[in-house]
Amino acid sequence: MLKKLLTLSVVFFSVLTLQAKETEDQTINHMEIATIMYYDGKYDKALDELQKAKESHMDIEWDKYHNMRGLIFLKEENYQSSINAFKEAILATRKKVYQPPVEDKPQREYLFKIFSKNDKQEKPVVKTPVFDPEKLRKDQIEEIYIYLSQAYYKAGEYLNAVHALDDAGEKGRASASLFTLRAECYWKADQKGSAIDALSRGSKLFPEDATLLKQKFYYFAELKLYQASIDAAKAYMKKVPANAQEYISLAQMLQSAGEGEQAIEILEEAKLKFPSSAKVDILLGHYYNQKEMPHVTADLFEEGSFYDAKYLKEAAEMYRRNGALAHALYLNSMMQDKEEKTKQKVAIYISKGEFEKIIGLKDAMDRYGLLQNDNMRYALAYSYYMVKDYDEAEAHLKKIEDDELFSKATVIRKNIEKCRSNSLECL
């Protein structure tokens, strides 16, 4: 009896184990797990799950299998594998047999509902959309072609990317950004006319989108078609409130085209709209400096430094060149970079002829490693020479290695010898 019970137990346990295994195999959906892994960014695990799905001998959706592989390879920057996978996905989608969706089962009628007062109320008629497998197929294939165009673009196969967008049909023309992509593909394939034509076609379909005009502006500028670029830029600025950088880009393009006056006009307009833009002030200052208006330049540089302290050095330097040395020193005093501040202060003191103050900066120059620069060491040596401290002057002149400065140092050392021989020589 016990033996029979043991035998039955073993059989029962074996049946349970087999059922559990069958249930496990049925419940594990490797395609779904691969999808989850993909969205979690775990691409290697997603590929493993796809391989398990392939090896499971189950009837999997091959279009989704190949499409998922294409997306994973695209994320991993394995573009050729991505292209191949998307092509397989398109072939699988063409062969796919679409099944109509399973209708929801009617709700069970419970005994109490039979006698419900609301039993005679009419239920709203819900129209079930017509099942159209060919439309589903077309939509799916067009979507895969969009992905394929991205893979081609990343792989540098620009004309193939355009062909994929064309094959995407309506979806390939569904947004302005896809025309931007088309144009960029043509541009990189050195088909400049087709690139601009793509932007024009996009603008007709999406007249409110300003990015197409913006890209056209840059393309015209690169082709040195400056008037066309200016027209595109102005059309863009009418659609979208341009930012300071876009005004700057337009001004730089005008300057490159030899339209300096127009460039200044654009920047003056930008200055009114963006009074706190340091870059506008600085660029405008440079353009006025090219017109030999250094005092206006200095004022603009100083104004720019109010909003961005990194321009203090340029502002102080411009005032130094203009001879406004006291104001140059005032701006220099606000600089935070100690090394640059000391270097510029030396230049200002040289302009003022205040050589004792340069000598007073010797410790700071040494501390910031400025005496490794032969120009700075020469300035210090020259200052010692001017205050008649010949020993210190010679000590620093001997350390100069730059050929040009060494020649100057030799002249000063000869003068020092004359002064030592006859002090009347250096009165």
Image (cartoon, rainbow, N blue to C red):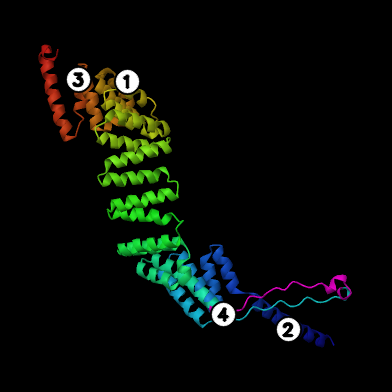
Q: In the image, what residue type sits under mark 2?
A: Val
C-alpha span from label 1 to label 4 = 83 Å
Residue 427, percent across and down?
14, 12
What secondary structure is marked by label 4? helix
Q: Left or right: 252 with respect to 100?
A: left
Tell us which disc is closer to us: 1 or 3: 1
Q: Which numbered marker is on residue 133?
A: 4
**Which portion, as a residue range, is magenta?**
113-134
Judging by the rendered image, the residue that carries numbered circle 3 is 385
Picture coordinates of residue 126, whole percent (x, y): 70, 73
- Viewer-nearest residue: 72 or 323: 323
- Which residue is tagged 1? 326
Q: Position of residue 323 (x, y in %)?
A: 26, 23
Figure quadrant of the N terminus: bottom right
Left or right, 94 with reference to 303: right
Q: Residue at the spot x=39%, y=55% of the render? A: 213
